[in-house]
Image (spheres, grey):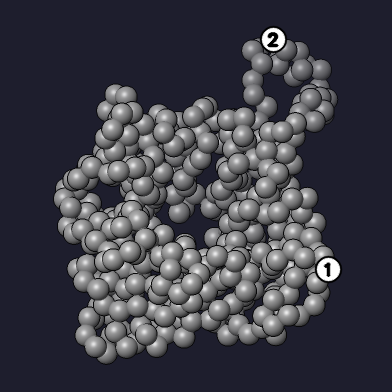
Amino acid sequence: MDRNRIARTLGALGLVAALAVAQKPVQAQTPVKWRLVGQLELPQGERVGPLTVSPFGELVAGTAWDGETRFTGRIWSLNDGLQVSALEESFQALLEIDFGQSLWDPITMAAPVYAHGRREFRTWSIADGALTRTVTFDGDVLANDVLYDPFRAGFIVSQDFGSLLVFSDAGEPISSIEVDPMRPHRGLQLSNDGALLVVNSASFTLTAPMSGLPYRCADVLCAEAYHDVPGSYGPYEALLAFDPQGLRVATLPEVDPERAGLQNGPFRAVSEPTIRVWTDVRAWVSEARPEVELSGFRSPPVWGQFAADGMQLLTLEDAGHLAIWDMTQGARVFQLDAADGDGIVAARFIPNSTTLFVSWASGVSRIVDTERGATIQTLPQPSADAVVSPDGRTLITYSVGEAPARIWRRR
């Protein structure tokens, strides 16, 4: 395909131009869209863990590993990769570090960062890396996720069994959100306006309206307000992706050919792997119909991501196939297939562009143009994953447990 395009270009330029090109070194026919500007500052021998970009895109946080026993939390400048601070107290693993920052407060240095294990969570000051609090959970609580809620200035904790726990920003227990205590509750996400909490709760999706809760309180009335949050147990399908701007939710219904199309209480099975996309989940009832249903998968979908505007959904299948779906049409508009056992293992939308970061099981990672279906650039290893700034101008490629982590800027 590239050769045909080159041939057509040379034909249009004419014989003289063709001869002139032939006398020069061969140049890449697709312009490079990203340039390497640096890498995250790491002491010699250290390897990087999972990375997180701040909401306004000026900082990146992550853990680093010395290759033996020490795990350290670090904050870097996304502009040049220089270390801003090292977090006090060593970590026990390559944990994810999140920013406790609201989308309306651009002063990132005043916000905390936080990380959690199964039995505690901790917060730090970004400016100097000082540990500001350690919250140890009571009894047999085993946390699966911790989410900072800037709209109420508190933390929400999900666990294997029991309610969602609520703590103040000072680390004091406030209340709990009553949910099915016998299901494990995992990933927590909050809408951009703070009005909707979405929880991945083991084969069903829990949603809870949060807009009526008071800001920064710890009294009895506050405890009662959290207890009274009306959780909606539905859709009764596994959560695949959440659009925090448009409040779309993508879920995976149970695959059961014998009951496909039949209503069984809140459950509606399908005959083949399917994704259902819902709007207005705050008013979900078992009779509700999805906005669109996506089918035609060759293996079960295992991961999804909505584009920033919520109008496209990126999906990865268990067998390593990738697709992009248009929400207005409910149709596949782009796909990349696994080949010869080399499936796609990671992909990310790059905001304000028509490109994706895509990584294959073989270790190859590329920037792919979804409009032309062409590779724009192949990235050097290690680059099994990437984080992107909110404006889509800066990309960090890395592999957990390896070094370096490279910073790229879009031209």
Toward the top, the furthest residue is 23
Q: Name which residue lies at 16% across and 50% down.
A: 130
Residue type at numbered disc 1? Glu
When the figure is inspected, residue 363 is found, relative to residue 111, above or below; the finding is above
Residue closest to the eye, 167 or 210: 167
Instruction: Note whether residue 249 is visible.
Output: no
How many numbered marks, from 0 up?
2
Q: Name which residue lies at 57% across and 50% down.
A: 349
Residue type at numbered disc 2? Gln
When the figure is inspected, residue 208 is found, relative to residue 100, above or below; the finding is below
Horizontal arrangement in the rendering, residue 365 relative to residue 320 (left or right)? left
Secondary structure beneath label 2: loop
Q: Name which residue lies at 52% across and 36% down.
A: 384
Instruction: Note whether residue 255 is visible.
Output: yes
Quarter of the image where one finds residue 167: bottom left
Q: Position of residue 138 (x, y in %)?
A: 26, 66
Q: Which mark is residue 29?
A: none
Disc number lying in front (1 or 2): 1
Q: CA distance from mark 1 to mark 2?
A: 67 Å
Horizontal arrangement in the rendering, residue 366 relative to residue 404 (left or right)? right
Q: Name which residue lies at 33% across and 53% down.
A: 117
When the figure is inspected, residue 212 is found, relative to residue 196, above or below; the finding is below
Q: Position of residue 26 (x, y in %)?
A: 66, 16
Q: Position of residue 103 (x, y in %)?
A: 37, 65
**Which badge, 1 or 2, is on the more N-terminal residue?**
2
Q: Position of residue 42 (x, y in %)?
A: 30, 31
Q: Which quadrant is the N terminus positioned in?
A: top right
Q: Which mark is residue 23?
A: 2
Quickly name the residue at label 1: 258
